[in-house]
Structure formats: structure tokens, C-alpha cells
Amino acid sequence: MVSGIVVLAVGCGLPLLVPVPALALAEEAPSGREAVPVSRRATPGDGEGPDRRGASPSVRGTGPAGRADTPPFRGMGPAGRGETPVVRGTGPIGRGESPPVREEEVVARDEDPALRWEERPTVGDDALTGPDEPSTVAKPVVLKPGDRGELVKMLQRRMRDGGYYFGKVGGVYDEQTKFGVYAVQKAHRLTPKGAVGSEVWRALDRKPKVHPLVPNGAADRVEVNLTRQLLTLYRDRRPVLYAHISTGAEVRWCHQGRCGDAVTPVGDFKVTRRAPGWTKGDLGAMFNSLYFVGGIALHGATRLPLHPASHGCVRMPVETSKRVYQLVGIGHPVHVRGKVTPPGIF
């Protein structure tokens, strides 16, 4: 026999009409008292109890002496007691116990591209609803040369915006991308290597640790740091480009009866000649050459190791040299400072 309807709020606020037996709507009053109907209201936040398990507050009836302090109303189960199950949401397997998402996790997912999120069980203070419930945890992602995908594309875009990389934003970790990573690491005094972990992502959010070699220099100039093997280009007194470079190896060389010292001279110079595109001489090929003293130039090169390896020129990535060639003209100041040190010491 159905003698009443209970309205429950479920899902996205849609009402659910549930028929309830008359016996569940009224409790027999003791000593001949008139039966008092017992109802259950759906309240805002129903199903989100303090134990995070979606337990609803119990519904109490009206007991003897007119007090509303009798034990929670229960249905008619075995032995006349038959506890009715607590109403829960509509989650998986009908339990509705989806673990809550912590605010700091949502922020971390959106803001830190160096983290890959995985599900694994945790225990202790980090457990959400018990030792067997899954908790979202972060593991660092390391990019390496040869990798592909959206994360590589993001890295390339961030490096381009920072003035470290001028190649294609195509999602392929190629050699030009690696040279851009070297520039980031050198500019932030990190050990240059091809792997990109959380320290590189953090560096891209911070100001480079590069100080002017010539504080009172011209507004537009090029500075070459031999110690850190780093080139910095200034426009309007602001650094706008950082490049991984390889300068003179500081060894004696001889080629086809011609000998010399592989040294990049220290001093203050100006660009005296420009040679666009590829040019080939006795000592190798050069791209977009900007000569600043004799036959020594700033130029793009395909061989660009992490140590000084040239005959005296300042080698830089080919894609970066295209941008430098656009910004540097005849008479542009070039300042060279520092000294060559063993690899890995900055």
C-alpha cells in the first residue's frame, strides 16, 4: 500500500519521486496516541557528510512526550528492525563515493607541465578515503632529444617567447631544440644537458641569471661570455636573445701548411663585414657570418658541442643565427669577456 511520496534531490538537481509504504511514513504512537507522520527533507549538500563518503544525516521521528529526540527512524527489516540503507549518490556501482579532488591538485595539473598525473593507492595522511582508495599523485616528466608531442611543442613555444630558441614549433625535440635547452640552462646557471626536467620548466618562469658584461655599453650590442659559453644580444638596453655558443678551443692548429692559435680575442669590437647564407673556407662552412675582428666572426654552425671547439669564431645554432643576422648590422658593438674554462664549470 502506497500512502505517500518522498522527493529526493539527485544528480544535477532533478527531483526523484519515490513511493514509500505507509508503514515507513508513520510510526505507531504508543498508548493510543495519534500516529505522527515522519518525513525526510532533501537539503542542500545532502549526500556530502563530514566523513566525505556521501552519508546523509539520519531522519528522526517524534517520540514519547512529544520530544524529537528518539533514535533515527528505521524501516521494517528482519525481527521488526530492518535497517534501511543510507541514501547515497549515483556514482560507480551505485555507491556514489567518488573521491574528492583537492584544490591544490587541480592547480598543479593546470600550471606545471613537468608533472604527469597517475592513479595509485596511498596510505597515511595522504589517503583520501582509506588505504584502498586511489589518490592522484604527480611524477616528474623528463623530455629528451627525439621525443615528440604537445609537451615538446609547449617547450619550444616557451623557449621562443623567452628568446632562447628560434626554430620551428613543431613538437619534435630535434637538435635545434636541444641547443635552445642549453641556452636556457646556461642563462640560469644550470649544468647544460639535453634532458628537460622540472628545473628547466621552473627556469622558464624566472628571470635569467645574466648580468651585463658591459653595464654602460651601447643600447644595442652583442656580449660574448667565454666563461659561460653564452651569447646575449641587447636591444634598447634589454636582453632579447640568449644563445648557446662554442668559441675558440685555445689550442694550436695547422691546416695545409697554415698554422694559428684557436683563440677568440677578448675586447671591444664592431661588426665590419657581413656574409649572408653559407660560405665555405679552408677551415669549414659558416652561415650568416658577422665579422668583428679580422677573419673571426659570429656565425651559425652545425657542429656545436658543449665545449670550446672553433678556430676562434663564435659558433651559434643555425636557426638562432638567422635572428642575430636580422638584428646586427655594420658597426654593431661586440664585447667579448671572460676566459675558457673546463667543460661543466660555469
Image: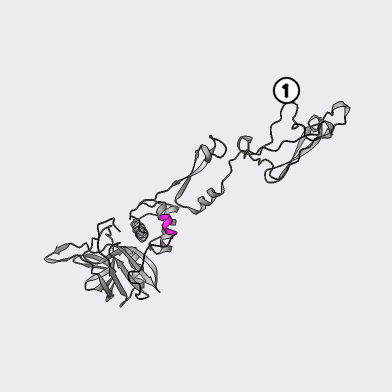
- Picture coordinates of residue 306, whole percent (x, y): 28, 57
Residue, far bottom: 331
- Image vertical order of residue 205 relative to residue 91, above or below: below
In which image quadrant can residue 233 be found? bottom left
Could you tell me the amino acid type at mark 1?
A: Pro
Q: Describe residue 334's horizontal placement relative to residue 62 as left or right.
A: left
In which image quadrant can residue 83 be found? top right
Q: Residues within 10 Å of mark 1 (few under 14, many from 20)?
A: few
Residue 271 magenta: no
- Image vertical order of residue 221 relative to residue 180, above or below: below
Using the rendered image of the protein, determine whether residue 94 is visible from the camera's viewpoint: yes
Q: Disc 1 designates what residue?
A: 78
Quadrant location, the C terminus: bottom left
- Picture coordinates of residue 289, whole percent (x, y): 28, 70
In which image quadrant can residue 216 be found? bottom left
Q: Residue at x 51, y 51 (%)?
A: 108
Q: Secondary structure at mark 1?
A: helix
Using the rendered image of the protein, determine whether residue 169 is visible from the camera's viewpoint: no
- For this rendering, which residue is in front, 285 or 222? 222
- For this rendering, which residue is in front, 254 or 26? 26
Residue, far left: 257
Q: Describe residue 23's horizontal placement relative to residue 91 as left or right.
A: right
**Magenta stretch bounds:** 200-213
- Picture coordinates of residue 244, whole percent (x, y): 32, 61
- Image vertical order of residue 22 relative to residue 139, above or below: above
Q: Describe residue 54's horizontal placement relative to residue 162 as left or right.
A: right
- For this rendering, which residue is in front, 153 or 200? 200
